[in-house]
Image (tube, rainbow, N blue to C red):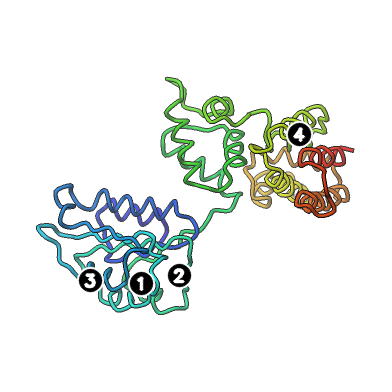
């Protein structure tokens, strides 16, 4: 089942006897668990009917014995197992999941690991309960996720602000959600749109000196702006690690190269779908493609790989990361 369907069912009080929540993205696992923990039982019922166990302090037989208890003066009991990936052997859960107690809601948090879909345990859970695979979102999916998160809060976010957050926080949904919540709280009265200025003022991310603005400067071949940004990076290396900058540039120019070979460039939606970017930003790739022909883009990608190796010490003894970045940007622009 998908996350949205699970939450919708829970809101309608449609409960399953076992929820096996696994995968690399803890954010959705935590949201489902918190919802069940907060809403299935009343505060009075929780005292006798809600049990929370931790994988490193328990074993699967203790979990099964807890799940087999009947609720006291309530319709359900809730058993939540956090950090279940630390349980040594979880396979005996097959015996309980094959015939679970209907009055128990057993929630298994199996974070940062994948449940082998070929195993009997997965098949049994699929037949009798909920197996939820919480995967990490791809980088190109994050801006859309940010928009949906803000929309659910009855707010808006400027596309540039969304990209800036994405660049700075990567695909850590927990961190992004926390920062968005802070931004919503700090929005001035009667304002409902988050901008790059709000982000700079409240989070500390510079709206002028970041990887997203470096892309723009290189796209426009704005030498002065590009040099100002890399000088800022050189003086603030902890906040602007070269690895993230090189990765960001690699992703950008890879999309520029892909743009060159798109047949139908007139349809921005088609271009956006092909590049997996918001159509709002297609113009940036159009401009970059005019400035850098395919041969030059291939050369830039090769340079990015070279400077990535040099930043890690290969064929480089003493050149600082800041100097490497300045040298790279000079070569890109010239």
Distance in Å between CA atoms under marks 3 and 4: 60 Å
- Which image quarter holds the C terminus? top right
Mark whose residue sits in front, 1 or 4:
4
The spot of residue 13 in percent (x, y) is: 24, 55
Q: Residues at badges 1 and 2 in contact (C-beta under 8 Å)?
A: yes
Alpha carbon distance from label 4 to label 2: 44 Å
What's the mark number on residue 43? none
Which of the two labelled residues, at mark 3 and mark 1, occupies the earlier sequence position?
3
Real-space Cα distance between discs 3 and 2? 22 Å
Q: Which mark is residue 125?
A: 1
Decide which of tag 3 and tag 4 comes sooner along the chain: 3
Which circle's residue, 1 or 2, is located before the other in the chain? Answer: 2
Cα separation, mark 1 vs mark 4, equals 52 Å
Q: Nearer the viewer, residue 2 or 307?
A: 307
- Label 4, residues with CA under 10 Å away: few <14, some 14-19, many ≥20: many
- Residue at 39% across, 75% down: 89
Q: Which residue is mark 3?
A: 65
Residue at label 2?
115
Q: Closer to the observer: label 4 or label 2?
A: 4
Q: Quadrant of residue 217?
A: top right
Identity of the residue furthest to the left in this view: 73
Q: Nearer the viewer, mark 3 or mark 1?
A: 3
């Amino acid at each position: 089942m998908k996350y949205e369907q699970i939450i919708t069912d829970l809101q309608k009080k449609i409960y399953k006897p076992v929820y096996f929540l696994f995968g690399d993205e803890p954010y959705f696992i935590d949201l489902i668990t918190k919802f069940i923990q907060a809403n299935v039982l009343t505060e009075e019922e929780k005292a006798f009917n809600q049990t929370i166990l931790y994988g490193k302090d328990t074993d699967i037989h203790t979990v099964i014995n807890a799940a087999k208890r009947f609720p006291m003066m309530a319709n359900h009991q809730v058993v939540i197992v956090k950090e279940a990936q630390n349980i040594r052997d979880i396979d005996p859960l097959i015996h309980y999941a094959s015939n679970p107690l209907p009055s128990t809601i057993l929630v298994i948090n199996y974070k940062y690991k994948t449940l082998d879909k070929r195993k009997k345990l997965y098949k049994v859970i699929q037949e009798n309960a909920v197996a939820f695979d919480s995967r990490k979102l791809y980088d190109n999916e994050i801006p859309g996720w940010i928009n949906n998160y803000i929309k659910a809060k009855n707010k808006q976010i400027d596309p540039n602000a969304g990209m800036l957050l994405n660049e700075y926080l990567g695909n850590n949904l927990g961190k992004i959600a926390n920062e968005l919540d802070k931004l919503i709280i700090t929005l001035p009265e009667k304002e409902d749109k988050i901008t790059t200025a709000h982000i700079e003022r409240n989070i500390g991310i510079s709206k002028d000196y970041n990887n997203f603005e470096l892309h723009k400067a290189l796209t426009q071949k704005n030498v002065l702006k590009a040099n100002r940004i890399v000088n800022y990076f050189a003086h603030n290396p902890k906040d602007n690690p070269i690895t993230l900058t090189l990765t960001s540039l690699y992703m950008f120019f890879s999309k520029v190269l892909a743009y060159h070979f798109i047949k139908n460039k007139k349809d921005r939606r088609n271009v956006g779908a092909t590049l997996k970017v918001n159509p709002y930003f297609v113009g940036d790739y159009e401009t970059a493609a005019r400035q850098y022909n395919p041969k030059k883009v291939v050369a830039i990608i090769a340079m990015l790989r070279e400077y990535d190796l040099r930043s890690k010490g290969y064929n480089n003894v003493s050149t600082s990361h800041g100097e490497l970045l300045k040298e790279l940007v000079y070569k890109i622009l010239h």
